[in-house]
Image (tube, rainbow, N blue to C red):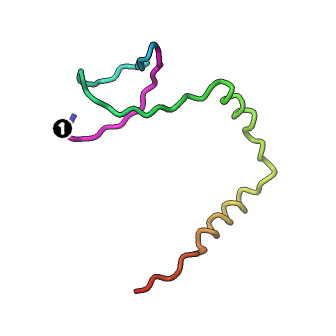
Amino acid sequence: MEKGRNMSRTIRARFRGGVLEPLEGIDLAEGKEVAVIIQDAPSEEDLEAFRRAAGSWRGKVDADVLIHNIYGDRLISTRPAPDL
């Protein structure tokens, strides 16, 4: 790895006894300091709720009209013209 180059990757870990235990191998030098972002994995309940909701909007929203309206709204400028 190049010196001074930032590298980012995502791994899964388990928190046990006050320590994060990686669930896969990581290639880090001993004593290397890293930043850790904690993001909870979705629970099985959350995943099941997502699965039940899948397709529930079918027939209620015309996707083509929605997309047309989104792109149309992006053309509307509410900012004043810049003074040059």
Q: Position of residue 43 (x, y in %)?
A: 62, 25
Q: Position of residue 55 (x, y in %)?
A: 75, 41
Instruction: Label 1: state its secondary structure.
Output: loop
The residue located at (65%, 24%) in the rendering is 44
Q: Is residue 7 magenta?
A: yes
Can you name the residue that lies furthest to the bottom here? 84
Residues shaded magenta: 2-16
The residue located at (59%, 68%) in the rendering is 74
The residue located at (27%, 25%) in the rendering is 28
Q: Is residue 79 magenta?
A: no
Can you name the residue that lies furthest to the left here? 3
* Horizontal side, residue 2 vs residue 53: left or right: left
* Horizontal side, residue 7 vs residue 58: left or right: left
The kind of residue on which mark 1 rests is Lys
Q: Nearer the viewer, residue 19 or 1?
A: 19
Tell me: residue 54, above or below residue 42: below
* Horizontal side, residue 73 vs residue 84: left or right: right
The residue located at (24%, 21%) in the rendering is 30
Query: Count of labels shown?
Result: 1
Q: Position of residue 15 (x, y in %)?
A: 47, 19
- Quadrant into which the N terminus falls: top left
Tell me: residue 78, above or below residue 7: below
Can you name the residue that lies furthest to the top here? 17
* Horizontal side, residue 77 vs residue 52: left or right: left
Q: Position of residue 51 (x, y in %)?
A: 71, 32
Q: Nearer the viewer, residue 49 or 83?
A: 83
Q: Main secondary structure of the magenta part?
A: loop
Residue 27: quadrant of the picture: top left
List the residue tagged with mark 1.
Answer: 3
Q: Nearer the viewer, residue 70 or 79?
A: 79
